[in-house]
Image: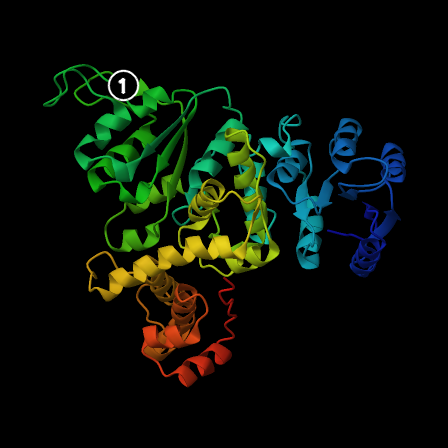
Amino acid sequence: MSISNKTILIADDDKAIRTVLSRALSREGYDVRLSSNAATLWRWVANGEGDLVITDVMMPDENGLDMLVRIKKIRPELPVIVMSAQNTLMTAVKAADRGAYEYLPKPFDLDELKMVIKKGLSPKNKPNNDLASIDDDEMPLIGRSPAMQDVYRVMARLMNTDLTVMIVGETGTGKELVAKALHDFGKRKNTPFVAINMAAIPKEFIESELFGHEKGSFTGAVAKSIGRFEQARGGTLFLDEIGDMPMEAQTRLLRVLQEGEYTSVGGSRSVKIDVRIIAATHRNLQILITQGLFREDLYYRLNVVPINLPPLRDRKDDIPDLIRHFFNNYAEEHNQPPKIMDAKALDFIKEHSWPGNIRELENLVQRLAVLYVEEVISLENVLSELSSKTIVEINKSEEGLSNGYADETLQQSIYRHLKKYFDAHPYDELPPNGLYVRMLSELERPLIKLCLSATRGNQIKAAELLGLNRNTLRKKIKELEISIIKDKF
């Protein structure tokens, strides 16, 4: 494709961004025109100028998303790339909905922008339908971190489709919230959203739960019962923890998805399915496939569009917003002024490993809201809650209760490190030699941090707990760059 005659119109009130874009895109051979306001951009577009638009959202004279609606009315085929520092899910959703070719959060990757421009100047994509009236505070997902931006962009593209989605993420990352948002702000929003947790249902009852049963079809079936597929008719069926579904039920589900119809247990009448399927799991389904525990053909039926939810430890910049959200929710429910957390407490919380992810953080915030009368939650308050929990776990481990009662935080840390090594290689290959030494080195840091947290920064007690010489512990703290917050009370 020749780009020598392609003109790119750029509107951004940040002079530095205009300069960077002008230089980079001019070197690519584009004719670049710059504006610091929406009015000039609109005049260019209205006059039929430009082959592609790059616009900021927040400009001094008009919101770029509002102008996008007007652009699409007069020039629907003109590709518009929206960039914004307001990196919420709703920004991505509104940009996609109002016809943006692509949404890029700031700071953006210049190489990615160049690639998007090249695609945008090739055959065009069709814009989505209308979600323009939704406000940011209506969305259940909180966070503006880079880790969440990829999630938002995928969700924005999926809102007005019926594509099957597979949500993968650790326990407590908010998989059901994502599924519910895809439903509540999608084309089936006025229809039922039905969730079923595969791990919570005895395997002999899963088919009955999904497809219903006829009276007398099995012992205990004293009346006819409709299943979740029927309950979700016209809407969305959320299959949570799909990795825990027994093989027999997987076979039945696959057949239903292939044929587009099902019969109830003990029934003979075929029922057409009319549901959008969203599945979720915290397990690695590809490993389960190699172990013969999950059907590969069902995996490809469900994994049409994957959404990978990041764990909280990979999006720690979102923690202040999440804490504020949870405090505000509690205050609203109990008609109280919302609490806030001081800077030292926030810094300490960011260093926690959060094995329970957002669910663990929410539980902590609720305990702090209930148990402390102070309006400003301090480091002392946080340490009291986190340290008491850690000490109990360590004591259980020391008492020899290793059959399921050992410290879950450390167990999950060990598992994460091992999984990182093995996931980086095909299942029929092994990681490089020296795994034992590398694992010990990587596990020292969370172990030492855990013991320092339990002893509230007392290195002498931590050394005794670990069974190390005090000087050895000091050396390791320095080598591993572990920050210590000592007990101030």
Quadrant of residue 217 in the image? Answer: top left
Q: Residue furthest front?
A: 489
Percent across and percent down for residue 29 are: 81, 57
Q: Position of residue 282 (x, y in %)?
A: 36, 48
Give above or below for 463 relative to 91. Answer: below
User: In percent of the image, x 40 and y 77: which residue is there?
Assistant: 460
* Front-lying residue, 302 or 88: 88
State left or right for residue 175 relative to residue 375. Answer: left
Residue at 31 percent across and 63 percent down: it is 394
Query: Which kind of residue does numbered mark 1 sit on?
Result: Ile
Residue appearing at x 88%, y 38% in the figure: 44
Q: Residues within 10 Å of mark 1 (few under 14, many from 20)?
A: some
Q: Nearer the viewer, residue 221 or 474?
A: 474
Q: Secondary structure under badge 1?
A: loop
Task: Note whether 173 is above or below 258 in the view shown.
Answer: below
- Residue 119 vs residue 173: left or right? right
Q: Is residue 354 visible?
A: no
**Residue 276 shows in this picture:** yes
Is residue 312 shown above or below 367? below
Which residue bears the numbered disc 1?
A: 226
Q: Quadrant of residue 207?
A: top left
